[in-house]
Amino acid sequence: MKRDYRIDVYGAMLRIANDKKSALNEDTEHNSPCCALCAFNSTWWVIIYLPDKNLRNACHESVHGALSLLEAIGHVNHSKDQEPVAYLADYIFSKCQDFISKLPA
């Protein structure tokens, strides 16, 4: 299963999948074994592979995805301005929760 979500504020997309073949391919920049960032048709894609219903993994990969996207669009992350990372990681994690809730038992 895979689902795509819009990240409107950054003009990007988020793909979450529980099948590694449909989630990650050779053309993506892998920042962790389960998270990648790629550009397709001038759009940044955060791609997260969630093989199971583990919320801790979803949280972890959400942070990777947020940091990778912000870095790609040129946002400088520093301790005085953590809000973009926190809000984006929260958004990505909420979509991971939505995805996990729709997986079969």
Image (tube, rainbow, N blue to C red):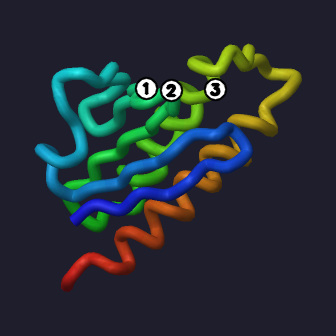
What residue is rendered at 24% in x and 45% in y?
23
Say which residue appears at 38% left-offset and 78% top-offset.
Answer: 101
Secondary structure found at label 3: helix
Looking at the rendering, which quadrant does residue 45 occupy? top left
Mark 1 residue crowding within 10 angstroms, few (<14) / some (14–19) / many (20+): some
Quadrant of the image occupied by residue 38? top left
- Please give the name of the residue rendered at 64% of the width and 53% of the height, measured from the top-left corner: 90
Residue furthest toward the right?
A: 80
Q: Find out whether the residues at labels 2 and 1 contact each other: C-beta distance under 8 Å.
A: yes
The image shows residue 71 at horizontal and vertical percentages of 61, 18
Instruction: Tell me whether circle 2 and circle 3 mark residues in contact (CB < 8 Å).
Output: no
Q: Amino acid at mark 2?
A: Ser
Residue 86 in the image, given as x and y percentages of width and height: 71, 43
The residue pinned by badge 1 equals 39
Q: Which residue is mark 2?
A: 42
Q: Secondary structure at mark 1?
A: strand
Sequence-first disc among 1 and 3: 1
Q: Is residue 30 above or below residue 62?
A: above
| Relative side of 42 to 50, left or right | right
Q: Nearer the viewer, mark 2 or mark 3?
A: 2
C-alpha distance separating marks 2 and 1 = 6 Å
Q: Nearer the viewer, mark 2 or mark 1?
A: 2
Say what amino acid the circle numbered 1 marks: Ala
Query: What's the mark number on residue 23?
Result: none
| Front position among marks 1 and 3 | 1
Could you tell whether 50 is left or right of 44 in the image? Answer: left
Q: Which residue is identified by label 3?
A: 70
Q: Position of residue 93 (x, y in %)?
A: 53, 56
Outermost residue to the front: 41
